[in-house]
Structures are given as structure tokens and as C-alpha cells.
Image (cartoon, rainbow, N blue to C red):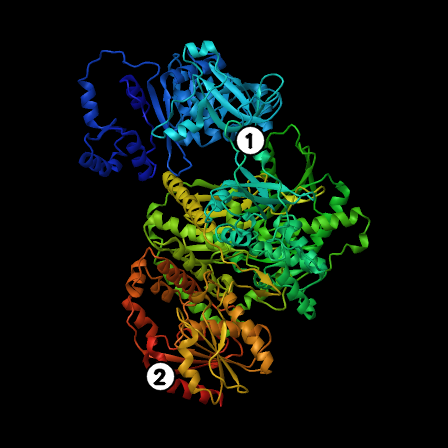
Amino acid sequence: MLIGILGVLKSGGAYVPMDPGYPMDRIEHILGDTKARVVIVEESTKDRLYDYKELVDREEESTLSILSLNSSDMKDSLNICSIENPLPSVSSSDLAYVIYTSGTTGKPKGVMIEHRSVVNLVESIRVVYDCSERGKFTAYTSYVFDVSVSEIFSALLYGNELHLLSDTIRKDSSSISDYLLAQEITHTYLPPVLLSLLPRNVYPHLQAILYAGEPCDEETGIYWGEHKKLYNLYGPTESTIYATCKEIVEGEVHVIGKPLVNTTTYVLDEYLRHVPLGGVGELYIGGVGVSRGYLNLSELTAERFVVNPFQREEEKEIGYNGRMYKTGDLVRFLPDGNLQYIGRNDFQVKIRGYRIELGEIENALLSYAGIRQGVVLAKEQGSGIKYLVGYYVSDDVVNHEDLSMHLSGLLPDYMVPSVYVHLEELPVTLNGKLDRKALPEPNFTGDKEYIAPTTVLEKQLAELYGEVLGLESSSISIHDDFFRLGGDSIISIQLVSRLRKRLDFYITVKDIFTYRSVEKLSAFIERNLKNKVRVVRSEQGVLQGVVPLLPIQEWFFEQVKDGVFPDFNHWNQSFLINVPKLDLEVLKKSLGVLIEKHDVLRMSYPNIDGTYVQHYGGLFVPPVSLLDCSGITETQLIDIFTDWQSGFNISEGPLLHIGYITGYEDGRARIFFAFHHLIIDVVSWRIITEDLKTIYQSFEKGLSEEISADSKGSSYRQWSEAIAGYKKESPVDRETEIAYWNDVVVESNNSNHFLSGLSVQNSYYGHVVLDVTYTEKLLRECHQVYHTQINDILLSALSLALTDFTGSFSHTILLESHGREDIFDDLDITETVGWFTNMYPFGLHSSSSLLETLMITKQSLRAVPNNGIGYGSLMGYVDQALPHISFNYLGQLDQENSDREGAWHISSESSGLSFGNDNRSTSIITINGAITEGELHFSILGYLPETQVEYFTELFKKRMIEIVDTLSSMEKLDMNTKNNEIEFDEGDYKAIVSLNDAKGKPNMFMIHPASAGCEVYQSLSDQLISDYHCYGLDSYNLYNEKKIDNLHQLATYYLNYIEKIQHESQQEEYILLGWSLGGQIALEIASELERRGHVKITVFLLDTIIRATDPELMKLISLPSDEDINEKHHVSINSDHFIEIKKILVSEYAIANQKISTNLKYTKTILLKAMIEEEYKNPLLAGYIHQLPCNNVDTLLEKQNLVTVYPLNVAHHYIMQEEQQIIDIIKRTLD
């Protein structure tokens, strides 16, 4: 393509680089924006443009020519062309190229660069390099990025040799090193990341290294600055790639230097005034390099390219330096005249741990009726607590409570201003800009969204929430949802562990999921003080003997047997703990106690007669490798860490290596841990870190009497034995579970064949990063609408990405989880170290609707029995072919607050290579993710062509961002809590009404069906008046603007009213009745009643059909389309009524797809099944439902004898016509 670029310039044209891998809509946008009529391609990519060419040729006056550089026709044409060398007729002010960068509108914007700007740039590079000819330059960057311009023309315009690096070489630092040496390269550009990885060999011919884009790390800057000429160049695309340059000496990596030739730089305040020396201001760039502007974007050009008020008279005379480019970067001048880069001038603030874009709040403010202008500022109280102030201009003062309610429907709670100030007009400066300093101070009355803990227990819980979530406890309201603050299942385990250690309360992970806020959990603990101690089996002392292998360990040894892991001794997990400097002798004593406490750390696995056996070894004090890393490069350090963990022998043990490293620039130390994966998982990292810290600090404080290795939870052996007996524990349940897994296996065997056809021998990596802003949205803003958890969103993104990638709507993946499920009442492994990981096949089913895909995924996850813990025990990993795609989200690895003095926290720094290079992944695509340093990272290992791995990586990231954007911008459900109940905006709505006046009779509660109220039961109630006092539960979603899509929350809300009536009438027995969806809500109410200790419960189900436990049924039922709604309800798609109907249907669809919280043990269940097949849009649905003997109700019951089925000769929608039969069955059952 370089030849094509040179040809375009030679002909006098301007070139516009495009990557053939771009999405077609981006290519079409660029071609349409530029009105380009010639596209230069290669034979392998020309077919992508033919559809667009036909469109242009048909609808435009001129045609689109596609020229293939390596086609036979082009070669024939070149052979007959003249060999004369005509000069192009261009001037220095003509365009050289237009390069497209990302735009804030979502469309890329074209930056126009003239010839004189390019010439000035390459002359500047020549001066920097001090090289005119006969040098050897590399071209590292793709031609679609502007850095390539400096690489290409710095070499060619001065008679130097240009070396184009291949993709294979560019992505491997060792290959780059080899190429630099073999080809005797003299000058090279490398991105900072690759520069840090470049092997530190002697490069005798290399004279200078250039990097740009971001600072390199200080250690890298020091090393290469001492050994070569190292230059840091800075500049935006709009200033022709580079504007300043600095030779790096003594590690000054954040210094971007002084202006290039014919370039001017200004550090200005918001009024375009020079800031004092050393003061921070925004960088403006002037001179020859300033771009002509953005193609076809005159307003944006005027905004970013401003008149230069500092242009001198002599400059005006020659037409030079008349405009400045506003970079948005914050810098300051140093005393020596160099510029130091500070950061971006993004308009963001941070409130209670959240990054907030004030402009987003201002836009929401302007959406309120009557408000003409709005500004939002972040202010700070004397106590240091930040809050938001909303200033608005309107004719009259608006109702601030109404305004807050309006904003809460558009924004997360923490983005709703705490106080508002009405203004007649906004203050402005002399030049017409908003004068923020002149805005009045508000009369602050407090943040209504934040409620501080009041009781001792609430304060303790807020502290623990803050610790495990990495938040300040002072920012946590007692109403904040643990999971919406960023919690997940792994962090829940940590919270449970600390509750038991600190407060001595027995709380399960399931309790955290149920009582999510500080207030709810506090109330639950206080109500259940009798649960403070639970009898838990454990093994104390130094354990010995054989331990059964868990299914995951059996899987490992099967891979060893099959030769998949030839280097099976090097299959580890390793990590670093960032600690203050420690007393080495105390550390060694502490490690001895740690080894004694966690018996699994003494495991070994001898091979006896061809079978690997797991058994405990004897006590030992582990040696500690010592290292001072000052003066050691990062690469050398990684090599040392890799060497430390490369010598394990699983047959003999020990299977751990510990190191203590000093010499870090932060003045702290690191503890290195490496364990063979057979004895540890990621959850264990935290347990080891916390236990070692506790033991060390107890020794340090002289509290040796408090140090004991005897207070152990359940052992790894006890868990292994329990899992081994899992199949025998409840045969009926296990038969149901096995049937579930058999269906999943069949589905798995029928999917993913597309990948098998693409797989290759070599592997390639992709990497996805969501920045801090998106990660915070993912953790804290995306779950309010559909009450999701993070895996729901990540797996939905994966499902959609796989559909984009393969064209199939169904895939089966191998899903990994922590495996520490709370399924055995007498075992507690929250503080037990070991490899508990569980993996199981999981079906992903996407649709054309993003939200429907999310609901399908969410409900599919909830339908997995016991979170998949039984798959390995019931089905095994050996006999079943596992899916080709594996997925593992590890949670937040560094969520604790690491800024506290003396803190111990797991570091994100590299701890070496944990897996031997000869070991191969068992999946075609392996996806591993975690949150570190506030960012979500996914590594994708694929045994696919490199381009396919890159393409899939892009799709996965695109879909994640799409879901996060969609959910974070949607209206959230207002689920505030008070006194352990849910508060709703009810208006005139009444949740429960009396349907007859049979006072003194047993109560019967009738729950509304889908999309209807309780009036459907009026006639039935009238007929039952002599025997039962009937109450109707009316549909909350039907009569309230904000919808509820969570089955448990809706059922609990209704139950509050039911319990009140039962208490007032002093009745012990609960009688519930529900038609269709109402029956499912009734079952969830029964589940909650059982959890609260009630056993006298009867539920009548009028043809209720359970979907959540039946994946095949869920596939047959989908949300109605807009056209379906229009046809059924005869409402315009654009009307408010249509929107309301759709919101109701979406919430009911979500509820219908949810499984009840806990299977029923005591509830007598009567199913009245409609036997006449209904006419559904999907013709397969009626037949499928008809063949279900119990409508899947039996899948929700612990015992089959709890359900009685009465067939009714009627269709589902007409079941209330069989009123007399229903009454007879009710009386027969209850008499």
C-alpha cells in the first residue's frame, strides 16, 4: 500500500487511508464524506467494495473506480506506461492526506493535513535524529495511523532506507530485537509498551529511538536514555502528528519537551490568558503543523481551531501562525522551558467513588419543562464530603422535589444534585463565557439520597462493605445495594468471611444476595441472633492421609494423560502482595503458621500404578527467596519470578515458592507467592493474604497467644468427600439435575462446529480493556433496570459477539465459577484454601434484541442447578466432550482500598509466567477476565487465524460497550428500602382489595394474571363468599409508571400486605391462588413464607406454566414484537400508550422467566391444567406445553407428592369459564 500512497501524492492527489478490516459502515462513511472516486485496493480486499460501488454508480453523477495494485490488469497497464517523470502540479497549501479519528458524535471525523505541514514535520524529525542519509529506518505503524507519515517520509525524503515491519514482527518484542540487529537498523519508532519489553541487548548500529502517544515507564526511560538517544514526541493528529519533542534523560518521561521547528505552544487559562510559569493550563498549538480543520465539519473546526490572539505582526504579514489548535491537554511550563504533561481537561468530577460527567447531568437538567439553561458543579462541605449543585434558569422557581424525581428517572442516584439554585440568568465573563466562579453558593440542606448508618451494627456493616468493595464507608448509604456498588459472588464470599471473623455471625452468601443493603442485612442479623453459631464440621490439627480428587482435579490429570499439558509441573497460579517493609524473621514464623493452618498447601500427588493420588504431607517451614530488585529491569524481574515457579514436582512437593522482594521505588516490599494450580484458586489469594497479614501483625504486636492454626473451617478433604457423595444425597433431585445436564450436553454437541473448521495449530492473543469510566458503569450503573449481575451482562455480550462472529444464535460455552457454593449445611469453606473451581457447559442464546438476549442469559443462569456445582460429579469431565469456548470472569482482584498506610493488597504487577510454554489450552477460544486497578481486562487466547482472533476481540468489546451504554442510560427501578420492606411510588393504586365480605372466614389471596388486574376473580370470589374471605392482589406494573421485573421483589411486596391481614385475623394457614403468571408469583410467595418458617401453605395454580427450569420452552417463547403489540392492542407504535404497554410486557416477560428463590418443601400445590391447545404465534409452543404433565411445576418442588394435577377441558385463556369446577376442586382440597 506504500506504493499506492506514493502514487497518489505523485499524481497531485490527497490520500485517505482506510483499513480493509474496518466495518463496512465506517468505510462507507469515509468514502461518502470525502466524495472519493478512486479506491486503491489489493486483490484480497477488493470484493468488499463492489456493493458500495454499485450504489455510487447508480445514484451519483460520477462513478467509483476500484484499482487493485497487485492485479494482472494493473501489471499489464504499468508495462505499457511511459517511464517519464513528470512533476506534480501541487502547492504547499494543497492537501496531502485526510486521516480519520474517532468523533464524539459516534462518526469518525476527517483531519485535513497539507503538504507544508508534512514537510515541516519530517524536517523536524531530521533535526531531532541528526541524520540526513544512508540511515536505516523502520516503519512500525500501520499506514492508517498518522505516525506512519513521519516514519515513511522521514526516511524517504532524505535518502534513507525504509524497512516495513510485518505484523508478525511488530507484535513480538523478541522478533523486533532480532530484526534491529540483523538489519543493522539505525533509527526506530516503538510504542512505549513495546519499548518496555524490548530485550536489552547491545544494538551497535541503533542510534536513536523515538516513542509517542503516552509516557513510557520511568525505569524504561532511564535505561534507554542511558544507552541510546531516546526521544519522546508529543502531538495530536490535528497538529500533524507531533508538536513537541524531548530527549529523555534521567527518566523524565512526563516531560514532552519544547516545540518543533515552526511550531508554537501556549499554556492558557479558560480566558485564553497565559498562566504563570509552573501553573497548569490547557495547551494550545500554533504554527505550520496546524491542520486545515475537520472535513465537512465547519462548526467543530471553528470550536477547536481558534484565532491566535498572540500572532505577531510579522507573522500576519506572511500569513503564518494565525490559528491555534485547542488540545484539551493540561500541561505546565518548567523553569527550563520544557512542557510537562499533566493530563486531560475532561469535564469530570468524582462523587462518592463515582466518576461523573457534569455535562450529562446538565443535559438531563435541560430536559425538565421550563428550564432554559442549566449548569452543574461539584462542591465540597467542610467535612470534605462532595455534593452536586444544579443551577438552572427558568421563568419561575420549579418544584425541586419534582425536579429530583425527574432526574432520578434519567440518571443514577449519585448523579442527582443534592441542592438546586434558581437563577434569572447565568453569570458570564466579558468575553461571553460562563463565569463559574460567580455562581452563588447554595443553601445546602443535605443529600436526600444518602442515609448514614445509625446503629452500631449498621456502622460495622458499612465498614465491611467499604473494605471489600474498595470504597470509603462514609460514602455507603444504608440503602445502597451491595451488588450495585460493585459486589459480585466472589466479593460476597469475602464479606461473609469477614462477618464471621469480625462479628462472629454465621451469614451465608445466599443471605448477602437476599439482604443486599446495610439496613436489610442488619435487620436480618438482629432478627436471627439465634443463628449466630452453626454446627459446622471441620478437621483440626495437622491433617494427614489421602484426599479424594475433586472433579476439576480429575480433569487436570486427564489432560496430563492425553499429553495436553506436557509441562504439567509448571501449571501454576502466582501473585504478588504489596506490603510495607516487613521483619523477615517474623514473616518466616508467620509463614510456618500459615502452612500449618492451610493443610492443602502441604499436598503432593504421587503417581501410584498409573493413578495420581492426593494426600497431605508433613509440616515444614517454607524457605523464602530474597531479592533486591533495585537496578533490575522489569523483564529481568519477570524472568526471575518465572524461574522461581518452574521447579515444582507434583509427585514430591512442596508445591509452593515464596519470595520477599525489596528495592521498589514506592519504598514498599512485595511477597511473591507461586502455587501449583492443583492446590489453589483465585479466591484463595485473598484468604492467604488476609490470614498472613493477621498472623504477622499478631506476632508483631506480641499477641502470640492469639495466634492459632486450630481455628479451621471445613477441610478440603471434607468438601471433596461431600462432592463425591453429591449424587447419592438426594436421588430424586439428582435425577432431575442429570436430566437437565443431559439436555445441555446434547445441545452442546450440536453447536460450535463453526469454530472447529477455523481452528489452527498456533495460538494468538487478543486483549479487551474497558476504561475506568466504563468499568464503573458496568459495576454500579447497569444493574438497576433488570436487577442483573455482572456475569449476566458479560455473557450477554459474549452471546451477541459469538452470533456476530459465527452467524449462529446458539452456542455452548464452558463456564467456570469459583465452585464454593453454599449447598452443604454442615460445611463452611469460605476460609478454606484449595482448588474449588467448577466448570460446566452453558448454553448461550441470543436474539436480534439486545435486551431480550440479556433476559434470556439472565434467566438461563438462574436456571442452572446449584450454579453448576453438580456437573463434574454427576456427568464428569472425562466422558463428555467439553465446549470449544471457555469463559471465566474472576471478579475484582484489587477492590480493597490500597491507599491506607500499612495496607496489604494484591498487586497487579506481573509475577512471571504461570504456565509452561509447552502446555496447550483445551479450548479453541479461552476468555479470562478480571478487574484490576479499576479497569476490566479480558485476555482472549484463540487457536484461530490471527485476523479472526482480532476480529472476535473487537466484536466482544463492541458488544460489551453497547450493553453498558444501553443499560446505564435506561430508567432505573426505584427500589428504595425502609424497615426491610420495599417502597414503591403507588399514587392511588391499592395493592390489595377485598373481593367479598366474608369476615371471619379463612382468607384466600388471589394474585392477578399477566397484563390484568384482580377483577378477573370477582365472580369466583362471589361464589366462595360462604366459605372464604377472598382478597385480590392487584397488578403493580399495570397501574404504576415504574415497573418491577424481579419476581422475588414483587412477591415480597405483595406478601407484606398478605402478612398484615393474616396477623390481624390471627390466621396461620396461607391459601393462595393464581392464574397463569399469578400462579408463579404465588409460588414465590410460598417460597418466601417457607423461608420465614411457615409450613401450612396451599397454592392453587390455574394453568401456570413454569419456563425458567425448561430451556427448550424458553426458546419457544419470545417477547412480542412492536408489530404484534400494535396488532393486538390497536395502538400506534409512536404513542405513549404503546410505550406503556411495552414496558408492562417487558417486565412480565422477565418475571415469567425467573425461577422461584427456593424449591418448596411443605407447600401443597394444586395445578388445574388446561387441556385444549391454545393457538400461539409459534405453532410448536402449544404442542410442547400440552405434553408437559405438570406444566414444569414439579421442577419447583422437593417432593413429587406435593403436587396434584386436575385436567380441565378448556383452553388457557378461557379457564375462568370453568368456575364451578375450580370451586369444587378448591373445596375438595381444603375440606
Vertical order, 210 against 483 (above or below)? above
Figure label count = 2
Residue 817 in the image, given as x and y percentages of width and height: 52, 56
Disc 2 is placed on an element classified as helix
From the image, tell me which residue sits under label 1.
343
Residue 141 in the image, given as x and y percentages of width and height: 41, 27
Q: How crowded is mark 2: few (under 14 residues within 10 Å), some or many (20 or more)?
A: few
Disc 2 to disc 1, C-alpha distance: 72 Å
Can residue 214 be seen from the camera position used here?
no
Q: Is residue 474 left or right of residue 339?
A: right
**Which part of the image, by quadrant, shows the N terminus?**
top left
Can residue 998 be seen from the camera position used here?
yes
From the image, tell me which residue sits under label 2.
1218
Vertical order, 787 against 232 (above or below)? below
Residue type at the position of mark 1: Gly
Q: Which residue is drawn at 49% across and 19% down?
A: 309
Q: Which of marks 2 and 1 is nearer the N terminus?
A: 1
Disc 1 is placed on an element classified as strand
Residue type at the position of mark 2: Glu
